[in-house]
Amino acid sequence: MATSLGKPVLCLPLMAVFASLAVISFTQFGRLSRRAVGWTTQRILHALVFMVCTVRVVFFLVALNEWDLTTGTLKNYSAGDGWHSFARMIFYASDELPALLLFTIYSAVVLFWAELYLIAADNMSLYEQFLYPLHSICNLCAFLILGMLLIMYATEWKTEDYYITTWYAMFLSSLYLVAASGFWYIGRSAATELKQVPIELQMRKKLLKEVGTITLISTTCMVFRAAVLITVMNQPLYLDRVVPFSCAVAYFVLLEGLPLVVVLVFYRRMPLPSRELLPEEGKLLGNQPFSYQGTVDMGMGGGPGGGWSVPDPSRSTLSVEESIKRLSAPEGSWDGNL
């Protein structure tokens, strides 16, 4: 036996882990909101991570009261207990919504890398006309299906008390396997394109390492999570026993927490402050009266997106070389000397 305090020993530390990740992602989101213009990939991902972690904390709070260690299922109450019915729905919703939001995070990263790859391959029409609409449609359909499942829990399946039900396991495992396939293919394609980009060797090695790391970790976690869902569906989970208890900890820490940490680390860099383009930079863009907000490290840490506005004519004139160097240098590192 683990201990008679199996639920607090499991839930309270996991609540602390996900609450910490929620605080980190919210802090980063706040910093990005002061710097970034518009909803960049980086801001969206930090918002999604915050939502996943916050809802997961709610799930552990509900599980403390609703999970029955002796039966390995949700507690059984009388049919007329309205509070139990409500708590049961919160249990399923707060467990399944973070899992689906994690799929949305995976798909957003895949979409970002696909954009980078197609820009390098000079095939942005495929991104704009096919991949981006497909990404939106897939996520919309996924959330609609989740809503239908929750409605079924409240009606036809109101006697279900297993942690993972059959239809939910089949639905989410399919999504994760599809996302894993896309992650692997697009990650390899992006890495191949990076090898051909004429950038400084050390920077290229760093970017290739980051792409390879997040691809390997995320793909592995998605495949293992899909396998776990299929394995434990419609089975009681006795968390007062050592093996199920340890598997539950590994499930949440390694298969959900670790991918979130990877996303936070990979998208940790702050974008450069928004500023107007200098006249020479505008000429390079066809004399368009734009203002640019750049990101550090070729955008890999900041995601696509940026704000454009009318330049201030009172800005001093620099050479094209100085302007480009200033645009590409990390914030605070440019001293005006080439």
Image: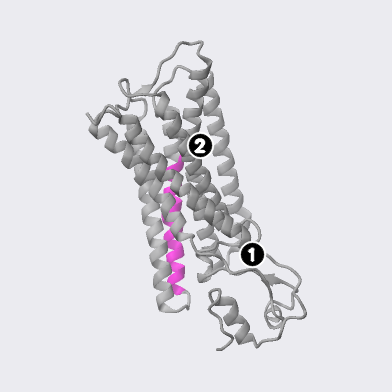
* Residue 273 place in picture, x, y as percent: 62, 69
Q: Is residue 275 magenta?
A: no
16 relative to 288, above or below: above
* Residue 149 place in picture, x, y as percent: 52, 28
Helix, strand or loop under label 1: loop
Q: Is residue 41 visible?
A: no
* Callout 2 amino acid: Leu
Viewer-closest of 110 and 248? 248
Q: Is residue 208 left or right of residue 317?
A: left
The quadrant where residue 142 appears: top right
Near mark 1 (Cα within 10 A), the count class, few <14, some 14-19 or many ≥20, is some
Q: Is residue 177 magenta?
A: yes
Q: Residue at x 51, y 28 (%)?
A: 90
Q: Is residue 134 visible?
A: yes
* Callout 1 amino acid: Gly
Q: Residue at x 41, y 63 (%)?
A: 210
Dominant SS of magenta comes to helix
Viewer-closest of 224 and 80? 80
Q: Which stretch did the figure color magenta? A: 175-196
Q: Is residue 247 left or right of residue 312?
A: left
Residue at which label 2 appears: 97
Residue at which label 1 appears: 306
Helix, strand or loop under label 2: helix
Quadrant including the N terminus: top left
* Residue 130 place in picture, x, y as percent: 60, 53
Q: Residue at x 67, y 87 (%)?
A: 318
41 relative to 330, above or below: above
